[in-house]
Image (cartoon, helix red, strand yellow):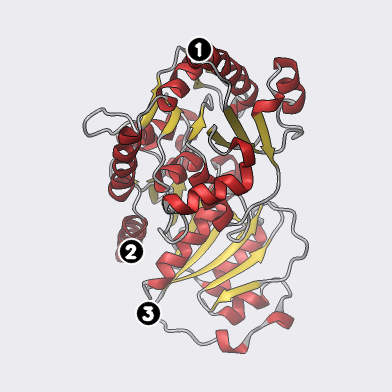
Amino acid sequence: MTAESFLMNGDDTHLLNKECVIKPQSKFKVLMLSDHPLGPSGVGVQARFLIEGLVATGRWSFRCLGGVVNHSNYQTTVVNPDFIIKPVDGFGHRDMVRSILATEKPDAVFLFTDPSQFVWIWEMRDEIRQVCPIVYWHVWDNDPYPKFNQPWYDGTDLINCISYKTYEILKTHHPNKTNYIPHAFPKKIYYPMTSEQIDSARKQFFGTKADWFQVLWVNRNAARKMPADLLFGWKTFLDGLEKKHGNRNAMLIMHTDPADPEGPNLLAVSEELGINENVLFSIEKLKFEQMNLIHNMTDTCINIAKNEGFGLSTMISMMAGKPIVALCTGGLTRQVVDYRDGTEHGSAIKPIKRALVGSQLVPYIFEDFCSEDQIADALMKVYEMTPEKKIEMKQKVLDYCDHEFAYEKMISAWDQSMYKVIADFKSSIP
C-alpha cells in the first residue's frame, strides 16, 4: 500500500510527500477504521499507540480512516511513511472502502470502535474477503452473550477482546478466532512521579488544600457513567468523614464537562447536595503529561459506571502507582481485583443490583449498580490506608500493570495474532 495511492484516493494529491512513496514490500498493509488516531477519545488514543508499536516492529504499515471528531479540515496527515490518516465523516462509506481495496489491496481491514458503527462494513464482508480478512478489536460491556451480534462476529476473521469480560462472553461461541488483548500505554506516557514532585505539584495546584484527600473521576458526563450518583455517594462519604474523623477535608476532581447535554447538570447537582466546596471541575483538554500529573497528584481514581467496557482512567491511575475504587462490572473487575488471588487494588464495589435493559439496536444487556453507602465505604477504605499500606499498594498495582496491561505484551499479541490470520487467509486462497 503506497502512500501515494492512498493520498490520491479522495483528491489529496496536493498533499503528497514524495519521500513517503517508496516502502518495503515485505510490510503488511492494514486499512484501519477507527476514531481519529490523533484525536482525544479513548479509542483514538489506543489506536495511535497500537499503530506506533506495530509500525516500530518494522512489519506493519497503516492507512487509517479517522472518524468521529469534528474535523477542522480534511487534509491527509502523514505521521510517518507507515502511519497515514485520512479524516472522514463517520467512518467512511462503501465506495471509499471499495476504492481502497481495489487500489491498495491491503492485507487486513482493522475495525476499532462500537460494533454499531460498522454494520455497513459487515454487510459488504463478502467483497472485503475477496481481498483480505477482517480483524476487530472488540469490547462488549456486559453479559449475556449478544446473539444479535452473531452475523457481525461470523463476518470477522479475528476478534481480539479488550476486556477479559468480553473474552469470557465470546470465547465459547468463537473459540478459534477470539483472544484477550487488553489496552495498554507505554510507560513513558503514564508513570509514578517522585514524592517530592507530587508534594510540590499538590501545593501549587491545591494550595491550602494540598493535604486533603484527593479523588479523581475522569469520564464523559454521560448517564451510563453515573456522575450524579457519584456526587450523592461523595456527599455520603463527606458526612461519614466528618462523623468519624472530625473533618470534611476531601476534594473530588471531576475531569469532565459538567454541562454536557449527554449527562446531568453537575454544577446544579453539587449545589443541591451542598458539596460545592468539595468538588472541583476540570474542563480543559489536557496533554498526556498533564494527565499523568493529575493522576499522580490524586490519592485514588474512582469509576462506578453501570456498564464499562474497559475503563482507561483507573488503569492509568494504577500505572501512576495509585489504588483505585471501582464497581465490579465489565473491564473494571479485572483491574480492581487481582484475578490470581482475589486481592483488591484499592477497593472493589460489588454490584448491589443488576438490571436487564435494552433497546431496538441492543435488545438486552445487564447494567450493574451500587449504592451511595457502598461508594462512601469504598472511599473510606482508601482514605484510611496507612502510609505503609499505600507504599505496599503502590508496588502491587505497578507489578500488576506489568503483568496484565504491559504495552510490549499488547504489541506482541497483536503482531502475532494478526500475522496468523493473514497467513491463514492467504493459505486458504485456491
Q: Position of residue 350 (x, y in %)?
A: 40, 18
Look at the numbered discs 1 and 3 and tell me whether their residues touch, using CB distance below 8 Å: no
Judge depth for marks 1 and 2 and give the one in front. Answer: 1
Quarter of the image where one finds residue 328: top left
Quarter of the image where one finds residue 27: bottom left
Q: Position of residue 194 (x, y in %)?
A: 42, 53
Residue kind at label 3, given as amino acid type: Ser
Q: In the figure, 402 relative to 5: above or below?
A: above
Of pointers 1 and 2, the one earlier in the residue sequence: 1
Q: Which residue lies under the disc numbered 1?
A: 373
Question: Between 299 and 131, which is closer to the camera in this rendering?
Answer: 299
Q: In the figure, 73 relative to 1: above or below?
A: above
Q: Which residue lies under the disc numbered 3?
A: 26
Q: Secondary structure at mark 1?
A: helix
Residue kind at label 2, given as amino acid type: Tyr
Assess disc 2: are there few (<14), some (14-19) or many (≥20) residues with their C-alpha within 10 Å of its C-alpha. Answer: some
Residue 178 in sight in this render: no
Q: Secondary structure at mark 3?
A: loop
Q: In the figure, 138 relative to 190: above or below?
A: above
Q: Which residue lies under the disc numbered 2?
A: 419
Assess disc 3: are there few (<14), some (14-19) or many (≥20) residues with their C-alpha within 10 Å of its C-alpha. Answer: few
